[in-house]
Amino acid sequence: MIAADENRRTMSTRENNASEVTQAGNERPERVPARSRFHWLLLGLAVAGLVLAFVIYSGLRERAQAETTLGVATERAAVPTVSVIKPSAGDGAEEIALPGTTQAFIDTPIFARTNGYLKSWYFDIGAHVEQGQLLAVIEAPEVDQQLDQAKANLKTAQASEKLAEITAARWQNLLKTDSVSKQETDQAIQDLSARQATVDSMKADVQRLEQLQSYERVCAPFSGVITARNTDIGALINEGAGGAQGLAPVPQELFHMAAVKMLRVYVAVPEVDSRAVQTGARAALTLDEFPGEKFQGTIARDSDSIDPSSRTLRVEVDIDNAQGRIRTGAYVFVHLKVPHSRQSPKSSVMVPSNTLLFRAEGLRVGVVRNGRAELVPIIIGRDFGATVEVVAGLRPTDQVIVNPSDSLTSGSPVQVSTPQTGGSR
């Protein structure tokens, strides 16, 4: 019993102590001093200041990095970027393509040889005609009347000649019997000779007028095509082909004809490639209107002299155009094979024409070496138009600048794009 009472007292004591502690805990917040709250405020301000300082630092750092990046980009932009090619090795036998224009083998204007009015015409432009075919008829009544008059005069002269012939024969018979004098007989014979000369003159005049009358019919002088017609029915026709002389009217061509079954092309071959011209050799021709197709021509002749103004050789190439596929005036390229020579050594290289720089000190090309541009003097062998042959100054391993700027100087830094081979044509 005593032990049970002690346990109850102990538990009661503990419950009273716990109740006092709880009451003391509930009353503590009301007793926190103002100094502790100030410390917490300072701590919050310090944390806010640190955050603000971090934000400012981050902004300044990003700005500095942006300025650095901009400076690097500016420096890179100041260095030009260039495209380069590697020269290709030259070939022992090269082909050159030279421009030319097709011309008719025969090309001529047709003028009238008599005066009058155009009565009719039978062919217009584009018509194919044969030699001797009638093109037009001119009405010339004056020529017809002159011819009739000349024929009448010829008949009169022939009658006089006949009478003089009879008289001369009669006087010669009378002279045998001494019935007339020698003087009178000679006069009769000479009168016959004069009459005969008059008849010959009248015959020539008739032939002349007959020839003029035949010119009233305008015929094709050769087989070809009519390329122009400059007259019409009723037009006044003036004879001749020259210009006006004094107050004479200016003749005008009636038609223009061209023989197109055979064409010719004149090309100017550079002096350095003139050895490629051999009379009778074959030459291929290409036209833009026939892509991938070649026409065969023949070198017919050349001028055998170099033009001092252009330093070229004038060459004629003839083309068979029996099918009429090629028109006159067409733009063509004549391909000639140029053999190897000392002027074109095997060590030569080929570069595009757009790599050349024409400077006062001579021909140059831009080469990239160690990240910098260098202007290299070169010597050209042959010019193929889109490409040129360089016989000295370049190596196949050089990086040649394509389309170099006129302001390019040796030693200036450059950036190189992907190199490519540039010797193909």
Image: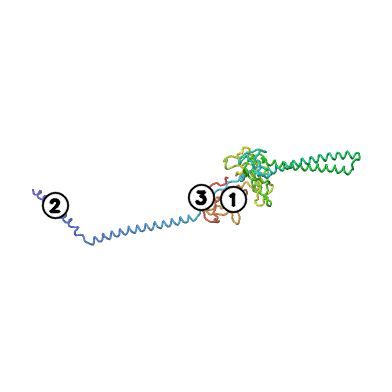
Q: Amino acid at mark 3?
A: Ser
Q: Quarter of the image holding residue 121?
A: top right
Q: Please give left or right for residue 370 compared with residue 162 in the image.
A: left
Which numbered marker is on residue 328? none
**In the orientation shown, which residue stands out farthest toward the bottom?**
35
Judging depth in this view, the residue of 393 and 157 nearest the camera is 157
The local crowd at label 1, few if under 14, some if 14 to 19, many if 20 or more residues have their Cα within 10 Å, is many
In front: label 3 or label 1 = 3
Q: Residue 5 appears at what percent x and percent y?
A: 9, 50
Q: Look at the numbered disc 1 and give the secondary structure of its residue.
A: loop
Q: What colour scheme does the image use?
A: rainbow
Q: Please give left or right for residue 10 compared with residue 95 in the image.
A: left
State the separation of the CA atoms marked 3 and 1. 20 Å
The local crowd at label 2, few if under 14, some if 14 to 19, many if 20 or more residues have their Cα within 10 Å, is few
* Mark toward the start of the polypeptide (3 vs 1): 1
State the separation of the CA atoms marked 1 and 2. 110 Å
Q: Amino acid at mark 1?
A: Leu
Q: Look at the numbered disc 3 and give the secondary structure of its residue.
A: loop
Judging depth in this view, the residue of 167 and 116 nearest the camera is 167
Which numbered marker is on residue 15? 2
Q: Are marks 1 and 2 in contact (CB under 8 Å)?
A: no
* Mark toward the start of the polypeptide (1 vs 2): 2
In front: label 2 or label 3 = 3
- Count the labels in the image: 3
Is residue 92 something that shows in the picture? no
Residue identifier under label 3: 417
Q: Residue 75 appears at what percent x and percent y?
A: 47, 56
* Mark toward the start of the polypeptide (2 vs 3): 2
Q: Amino acid at mark 2?
A: Glu
Q: Quarter of the image containing the C terminus?
A: top right
Residue identifier under label 1: 394
In front: label 1 or label 2 = 1
